[in-house]
């Protein structure tokens, strides 16, 4: 609410003050609406994010992996791989990620040209509120951007990708590790798919991605 509206309300309540006086005592720099961070915090369980990750192959070909992340538990809900991400293909991935009425209320994405009319139409048809971020503002889609950075540092930077089939296999293994094993600071050091605390038994180590990561359990 701006100074003019506040001044109008005061006049209706019988206070004879100048609008300049109202402006003088208003808090400066604050936004009358909730911040982007507040929006994320208040609606985390109802928000999903989508983004494309470019993956070069051993033969210098570029593959595209689409990642869909749920904000509530930072769970990697879906991924798919293609050479040519079209709006129609991305729309189909959205259906695959959210079957049987499991669609989120909000979908956060960037302004990539791949999200064309077919994609936005499918979003509306599924009852999802499309929330594209501002141009050149990746910080407005922080969780999926962080996921892509983590995926590169912990997996793709250490693996030579031969092609689509190989990338799908690698991403499948990493998805299982990320959701079921890897602990997250934002989840009080739990995994997206909650892990129970094991206090007794011998510790067994299972290598993941040829020993790039490990799963530790008690038996």
Image: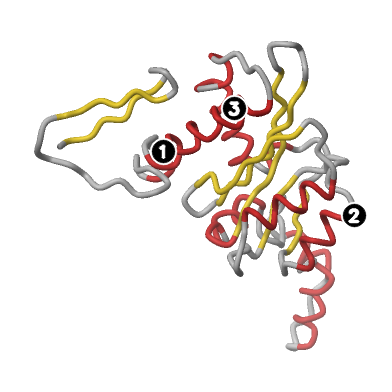
Which residue does the numbered mark 2 point to in the structure image? 117
Q: Residue 184: which disc?
A: 1
Q: CA distance from mark 1 to mark 3?
A: 14 Å
Viewer-nearest residue: 200 or 24: 200
- x and y percentages locating residue 152 in the rendered image: 58, 23
User: How would you rate the neighbour count of disc 2 (Cα within 10 Å): few for under 14, some for 14-19, many for 20 or more?
Assistant: few
Viewer-nearest residue: 204 or 117: 204
- x and y percentages locating residue 82 in the rendered image: 74, 34
Image quadrant in which the C terminus is located: top left
- x and y percentages locating residue 164 in the rendered image: 68, 27
Q: Residue 149: which disc?
A: 3
- Comparing marks 3 and 2, which lies closer to the viewer? 2
Q: Earlier in the sequence, mark 1 or mark 3?
A: 3
| Cβ–Cβ under 8 Å for marks 3 and 2 | no
| Residue 120 found in image quarter | bottom right
Residue 153 left/right relative to 192? right
- Comparing marks 2 and 1, which lies closer to the viewer? 2
Instruction: Farthest residue to the front: give it.
Output: 165
| Cβ–Cβ under 8 Å for marks 1 and 3 | no
């Amino acid at each position: 609410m701006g100074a003019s509206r506040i001044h109008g309300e005061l006049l209706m309540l019988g206070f004879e003050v100048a609008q300049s006086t109202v402006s003088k005592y208003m808090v400066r720099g604050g936004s009358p609406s909730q911040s982007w961070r507040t929006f994320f915090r208040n609606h985390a369980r109802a928000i999903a994010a989508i983004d494309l990750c470019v993956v070069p192959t051993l033969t210098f070909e570029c593959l595209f992996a689409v990642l869909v992340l749920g904000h509530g538990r930072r769970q990697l809900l879906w991924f798919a791989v293609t050479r040519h991400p079209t709006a129609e293909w991305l729309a189909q991935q959205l259906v695959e990620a959210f079957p049987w009425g499991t669609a989120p209320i909000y979908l956060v994405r960037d302004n990539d040209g791949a999200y064309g009319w077919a994609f936005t139409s499918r979003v509306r048809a599924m009852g999802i509120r499309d929330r594209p971020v501002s141009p050149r503002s990746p910080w407005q889609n922080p969780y999926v951007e962080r996921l892509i950075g983590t995926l590169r540092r912990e997996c793709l930077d250490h693996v030579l990708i031969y092609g689509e089939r190989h990338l799908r296999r690698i991403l499948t293994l990493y998805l299982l590790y990320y959701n079921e094993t890897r602990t997250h600071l934002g989840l009080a050091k739990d995994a997206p798919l909650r892990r129970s605390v094991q206090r007794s038994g011998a510790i067994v180590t299972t290598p993941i991605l040829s020993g790039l990561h490990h799963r530790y359990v008690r038996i």
